[in-house]
């Protein structure tokens, strides 16, 4: 069938071959796809972009593991693609980066450089300098004068050894001094953000000094370029005056017109409009064109255009979000690759060259380090903080590379000297992060934000402390002392807001009507205050404080870094925090707000650190049921039928249900697991790292569910197994029941000894092995991620040694007697609280089945009474290792969950959720230092 073959070949040639008017050969004609043609440079440009992006992204992934900024990967990638490494491969440079293609690559790279300098100008906030003018300017000037002097001194032997004598010495000395004195503000800002230093005293001063250093550095570079491009000193003066005049013109009349346009088009209240974006782009390139034609690089005009953009309403951040991806992914790597193609480390091939290279690196570092360290020390910083400031200010990064490229293009620097300075910039930028981590570890950092008073309302001695003294006489004081009054609420997504509001509302003190009833019932009469009101108690609101912590994950985007440096402004404009503040005002609940922008790996650490700094007594963490999977119409009893199946199928019978918050974590579910799995890991890291009590609120309400009962009546259900977490849960339930609209059912669940003995004799020996080898409650600070049975549950099961069991049972009996056996008195607020709690005990060989059945019945009763139900459970519990067979039975009947979920929430919560209980769940974990088993 030759006709068919010819047709296929013809179609292939038509699709793969690109011809111009002269008839350009294609791939099927046997032409080299990397052959460069000036009439069609796009093909080779696409190849170059692909090689550059893949190389830099791969290096960025590797170097990102050691917290190195992306610019290091881009510079090293450019060096590797140049004559230093890949350029030595025969035919690589001729086919991938031929000399004739470099002008086209350079054109696109310089366009991207202008846009990047525009983003750098957007990052510069002059208000930061104004707030810290005295300290920042002193450190900035000290960090420029000494390095400039050292660079000028070193330029003398460098000039006579490596530079062509046709180059003016003053020009070379000026470029060397500028390269030494510059600090890379964009890279510095990213390092401060990644190391969580922006809210420290060191970070604030360094950020301010970096901005001042950047402005002065760009001014000096403009002066150096003007001197190089001028034929005489008078011409250089005219160039400089024209540049200053243009800057003043932009900073005053154009900036005001720009602000008027932003308000007129609604770009401040909403996102930038098309008209505003068009004017902005025209201004960037128009300003760059003017500074270029007067004899200064176009990048200065683009930088000035970024400085004058209004900061109101986050407009600068919104502009950055629209431009940053294309610039950081394509344009900047192109520019740094061009630098790498001009960098040949092979030229550093003799002793004198390496001696000068080492001298350049050493003097550049110690000039910055020494000048800034001494200035910071004289300003009142400690030696540790001052040395950290010096290390941060020594960061070079891409700004020095821009200076070096300008000097190379102007013919002032030779290829050898250019390579020496590029190596110095890479080395100094690379060593900034490890030097700061060594000099200024997290435990030594001083936060600039006030931490508030150090409340100490929690007994440091643990749950059992103080009970040996006359407990009956001091039980009221103990109840008051164990009340939690300082809470940290985590807000990370809009979907989590309703759940956090529901839980926070339960934490507020009783309404004034309750106080009036207590006063009327007081034997002292209406004209006197009852004894319980002589001090601030749960009757008022003054002793309760809620701190809402807004978490934003830090990405490698410039806009995220800008948000970090402007966190003090965003904390007042963030919509989630604004809604939660309004909620607090409506409920007479004092709410303070904070905002943290950190990487995903540091989110849990920041939560733990924030709770410790604010003396928080309980951290409230949300977990919302995912809604990514589809919901099929079902009858009213379809849900219970789905859970009644016992046969294992390829698709879990619960796939049609929408009430399970762990649905996307089911092993048999064919949905995307990433979002919920990441949140599960985040929650578990909070449990592991927090030195404060933690409450995880698993919100079972889904969009489309039946409306909740009207009114504020709430009923709590607590299955009490024992252990620090269950004792914390019991204290929590008692505190919530201080509100007259809250009642509770507390069931102490015991397992008969004969059942334990029978199980140990007939079951596999691995259950007893797990019970004896699992870690204690206090070992949960470092979760184990192994797949073995013991390590899967190590942070939700207590060590089951005889000594630990006796200690735990003693503490359990004491707290149970304190509340369950309390004699009710008419004049006691605690008695009024306990009268709303129903205590009972049950002994059963199947505790998980008993708890799930009780929860289901209680939920139905609450619906009939028109109240809402909330389950409160401890995350870890005693006898968990003995009940693995029962939990497996439940999961076989209703569906299984991943080990990550079980490790996160514990077996009780998993049992309630998979059995179909629709009530929301609060999972509590006591701080490790509060556990008497330690």
Image: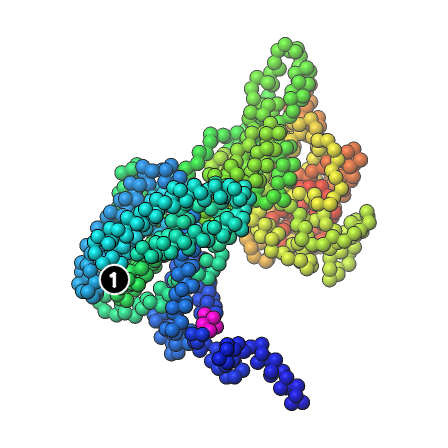
Is 41 within the magenta?
A: yes
Identity of the residue drawn at 43% across and 41% down: 256
The quadrant of the picture occupied by the N terminus is: bottom right
Q: How many marks?
A: 1
Quadrant in the picture for residue 258: top left
Quadrant in the picture for residue 541: top right
What scheme was used to colour the molecule? rainbow
- The reply to whether residue 349 is in sight is yes
* Residue 474 % position (x, y): 58, 23
Identity of the residue drawn at 63% across and 36% down: 501
* Residue 759 % position (x, y): 70, 51
Left or right of residue 900, residue 660 in this image: right
Relative to 300, residue 530 above or below: above
Left or right of residue 907, residue 854 in this image: right
Identity of the residue drawn at 41% across and 67% down: 105
Left or right of residue 351, residue 899 in this image: right
* Residue 50 % position (x, y): 48, 68
Left or right of residue 674, residue 232 in this image: left
Relative to 829, residue 604 above or below: below
Residue closer to the observer: 442 or 925? 442
Relative to 293, residue 915 above or below: above
Residue that carries the numbered disc 1 in the rendered image: 412
Q: Secondary structure at mark 1?
A: loop
- The reply to whether residue 154 is in sight is no
Is 28 within the magenta?
A: no
* Residue 21 % position (x, y): 50, 77
Residue closer to the observer: 142 or 533? 142
Read off the magenta span: 40-45
């Amino acid at each position: 069938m030759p006709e068919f073959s010819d047709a296929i070949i013809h179609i292939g040639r038509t699709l793969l071959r690109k011809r111009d008017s002269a008839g350009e050969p294609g791939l099927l004609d046997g032409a080299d796809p990397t052959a460069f043609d000036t009439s069609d440079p796009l093909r080779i440009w696409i190849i170059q972009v692909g090689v550059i992006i893949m190389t830099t992204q791969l290096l960025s992934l590797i170097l990102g593991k050691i917290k190195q900024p992306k610019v290091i990967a881009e510079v090293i990638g450019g060096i590797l693609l140049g004559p230093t490494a890949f350029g030595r491969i025969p035919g690589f440079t001729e086919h991938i980066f031929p000399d004739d293609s470099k002008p086209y690559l350079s054109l696109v790279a310089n366009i991207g450089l202008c846009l990047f300098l525009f983003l750098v100008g957007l990052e510069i906030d002059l208000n930061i300098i104004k707030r810290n003018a005295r300290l920042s300017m002193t450190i900035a000037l000290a960090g420029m004068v000494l390095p400039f002097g050292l660079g000028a001194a070193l330029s003398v032997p460098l000039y006579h050894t490596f530079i062509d004598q046709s180059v003016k010495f003053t020009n070379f000395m000026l470029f060397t001094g500028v390269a030494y004195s510059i600090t890379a503000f964009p890279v510095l800002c990213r390092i401060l953000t990644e190391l969580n230093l922006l809210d420290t005293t060191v970070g604030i001063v360094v950020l301010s000094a970096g901005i001042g250093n950047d402005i002065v550095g760009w001014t000096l570079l403009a002066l150096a370029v003007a001197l190089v491009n001028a034929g005489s000193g008078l011409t250089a003066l005219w160039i400089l005056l024209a540049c200053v005049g243009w800057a003043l013109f932009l900073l005053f009349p154009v900036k005001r017109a720009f602000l008027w346009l932003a308000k007129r088009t609604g770009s401040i209240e909403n996102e930038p409009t098309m008209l505003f974006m068009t004017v902005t782009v025209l201004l960037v390139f128009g300003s760059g064109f003017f500074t270029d034609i007067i004899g200064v690089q176009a990048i200065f005009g683009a930088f000035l255009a970024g400085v004058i953009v209004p900061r109101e309403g986050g407009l600068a951040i919104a502009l950055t979000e629209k431009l940053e991806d294309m610039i950081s992914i394509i344009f900047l790597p192109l520019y740094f690759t061009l630098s790498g193609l001009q960098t040949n480390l092979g030229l550093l091939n003799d002793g004198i060259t390496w001696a000068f290279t080492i001298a350049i690196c050493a003097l550049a570092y110690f000039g910055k380090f020494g000048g800034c360290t001494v200035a910071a020390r004289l300003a009142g910083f400690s030696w540790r903080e001052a040395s950290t400031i010096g290390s941060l200010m020594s960061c070079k990064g891409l700004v020095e590379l821009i200076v070096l490229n300008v000097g190379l293009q102007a013919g002032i620097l030779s290829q050898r000297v250019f390579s020496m300075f590029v190596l110095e910039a890479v080395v100094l930028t690379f060593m900034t992060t490890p030097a700061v981590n060594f000099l200024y570890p997290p435990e030594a950092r001083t936060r600039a934000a006030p931490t508030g008073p150090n409340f100490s309302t929690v007994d440091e001695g643990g749950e059992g402390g103080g009970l040996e003294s006359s407990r009956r006489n001091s039980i009221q004081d103990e109840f008051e002392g164990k009340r939690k009054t300082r809470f940290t609420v985590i807000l990370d997504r809009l979907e989590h807001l309703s759940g956090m509001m529901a839980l926070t509302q339960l934490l507020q003190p009783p309404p004034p009507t309750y106080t009036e009833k207590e006063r009327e019932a007081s034997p002292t009469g209406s004209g006197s205050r009852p004894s319980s009101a002589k001090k601030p108690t749960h009757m008022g609101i003054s002793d309760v404080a809620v701190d809402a912590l807004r978490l934003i994950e830090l990405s490698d985007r410039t806009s995220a870094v800008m948000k970090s440096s402007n966190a003090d402004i965003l904390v007042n404009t963030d919509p989630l925090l604004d809604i939660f503040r309004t909620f607090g005002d409506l409920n007479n609940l004092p709410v303070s707000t904070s905002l943290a922008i950190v990487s995903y790996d540091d989110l849990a650490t920041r939560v733990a650190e924030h709770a410790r700094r604010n003396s928080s007594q309980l951290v409230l963490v949300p977990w919302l049921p995912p809604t990514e999977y589809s919901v099929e119409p079902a009858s009213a009893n379809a849900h219970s039928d789905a859970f009644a199946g016992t046969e294992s199928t390829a698709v879990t019978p619960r796939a049609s249900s929408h009430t399970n918050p762990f649905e996307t974590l089911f092993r048999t579910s064919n949905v995307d697991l990433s979002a919920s799995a990441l949140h599960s890991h985040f929650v578990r890291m909070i449990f592991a790292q927090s030195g404060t009590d933690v409450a995880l609120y698993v919100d079972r309400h889904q969009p489309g569910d039946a409306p909740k009962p009207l009114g504020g009546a709430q009923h709590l259900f607590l299955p009490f197994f024992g252990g620090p977490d269950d004792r914390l849960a019991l204290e929590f339930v008692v505190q919530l029941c201080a509100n007259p609209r809250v009642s509770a059912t507390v069931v102490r669940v015991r397992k008969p000894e004969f059942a334990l003995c029978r199980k140990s004799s007939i079951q596999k020996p691995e259950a007893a092995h797990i019970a004896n080898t699992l870690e204690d409650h206090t070992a949960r600070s470092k979760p184990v991620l192994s797949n073995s049975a013991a390590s899967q549950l190590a942070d939700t099961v207590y060590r089951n040694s005889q000594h630990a069991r006796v200690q735990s049972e003693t503490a359990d009996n004491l707290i149970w007697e304190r509340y369950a056996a309390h004699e009710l008195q008419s004049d006691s607020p605690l008695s009024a609280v306990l009268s709303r709690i129903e205590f009972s005990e049950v002994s059963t060989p199947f505790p998980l089945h008993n708890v799930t059945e009780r929860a289901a019945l209680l939920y139905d009763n609450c619906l009939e009474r028109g109240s809402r139900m909330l389950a409160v459970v401890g995350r870890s519990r005693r006898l968990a290792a003995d009940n693995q067979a029962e939990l497996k039975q439940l999961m076989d009947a209703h569906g299984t969950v991943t080990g990550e979920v079980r490790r996160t929430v514990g077996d009780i919560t998993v049992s309630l959720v998979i059995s179909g209980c629709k009530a929301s769940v609060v999972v509590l974990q006591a701080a490790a230092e509060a556990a008497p088993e330690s």
